[in-house]
Amino acid sequence: MKLVAIQEAKVSLVPAGSIRAQLTSGAGPFVNFVVPPDHPRELNPPTQPLAVGKNKSYLIGWDPVGPGPVSAAAAARISLVPNAGPPANGVETYINGLPIGVPSKNALRLAARNIRAPVRKPFTLAAGGVACNIFFYTWHAELQANWLGATWATVGLLANPFNGPGMFPAFQFFQNSNQFMADMAALTVNDVIIIAGDLNITGADLGHPAIFPNFVATSNNLSHVLAFSPSGALAIAQGWHHVTPYPPHSIITAEVQW
């Protein structure tokens, strides 16, 4: 099964944009690709007040050759918005558990409501008569620089530990989101979670113990493909990257086995 995830596609050109046209051209490496017209925006104005005007979108496509994936659900952003409940959702519970003051927690809540959220696309793949669930995420991770005014940025545990420009709390919002935790809890040895995208952190940053522990990864600069499965055979067997005219970003591909 082949999956493609593209970030920062132009919303105004969907569905006729050049990137989508290449994916659906039936030529080159994208023969038989399915690219549905569900292009979630990275942000969602006007409900997110700090998103100004039209922003870019995510594109996801896949190749159904072979046993073929079954995918009825559209790609959609997962929620990182804190919710006090009851019960409190995972992001709110994470923020509440931090040893920081109320103003700093409120700054985190403001960020969580307005940062770029991951997009999720579930698939079911029949392999050797076994149904495998694939929870595919793509994410353009938020930048620390976008939130320099937040007082929590240099407070205790929330001091940014990254070499790259990514925003550390954004990764915690993702990992503590209800959807991600539900997918992790649902995994069997036949299933896998794949995260692909510009995470705005380096390969060394992925070694931080709080960043997707137990995932395997292939990386080039700020772009990464990560995978996790309870399967003892989990591996990223091959990885490549193609230099683009837009440094520091590369086209990165990987073969995930589980």
Image (cartoon, helix red, strand yellow):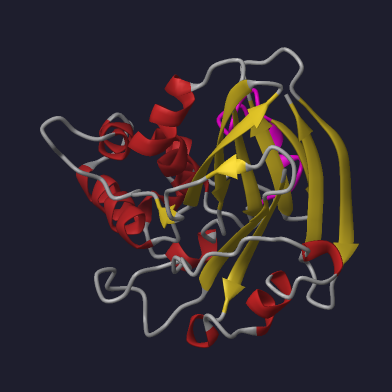
Return the x and y of residue 169 as percentages of the image width and height.
45, 45
Q: Is residue 220 visible?
A: no
Residue lying furthest left in this view? 86
- Viewport quadrant of the C terminus: top right
Residue 168 within the magenta-colored segment of the rendering: no
Q: Nearer the viewer, residue 222 or 77?
A: 77
Span colored in magenta = 201-215
* Horizontal relation, residue 227 to residue 137: left or right: right
Where is 159 relative to 258, above or below? below
Residue lying furthest top in this view? 232
* Horizontal relation, residue 94 to residue 68: left or right: left
Where is 163 relative to 41, above or below? above
At horizontal 29% and vertical 48% (from top left) the residue drawn is 104
- Viewport quadrant of the N terminus: top right
Return the x and y of residue 85 as percentages of the image width and height.
13, 37
Count of numbered tags: 0
Residue 214 within the magenta-colored segment of the rendering: yes
Q: Main secondary structure of the magenta part?
A: loop
Q: Nearer the viewer, residue 66 or 157?
A: 66
Where is 150 relative to 10, above or below? above
Q: Is residue 236 visible?
A: yes
Quarter of the image for residue 134 reads top right
Quarter of the image for residue 117 reads bottom left
Q: Nearer the viewer, residue 171 or 121?
A: 121
Q: Nearer the viewer, residue 129 or 152?
A: 129
At horizontal 45% and vertical 30% (from top left) the residue drawn is 183
At horizontal 41% and vertical 60% (from top left) the residue drawn is 115
Return the x and y of residue 256 as percentages of the image width and height.
76, 35
Where is 189 relative to 114, above or below? above
Return the x and y of residue 63 as percentages of the image width and height.
70, 53
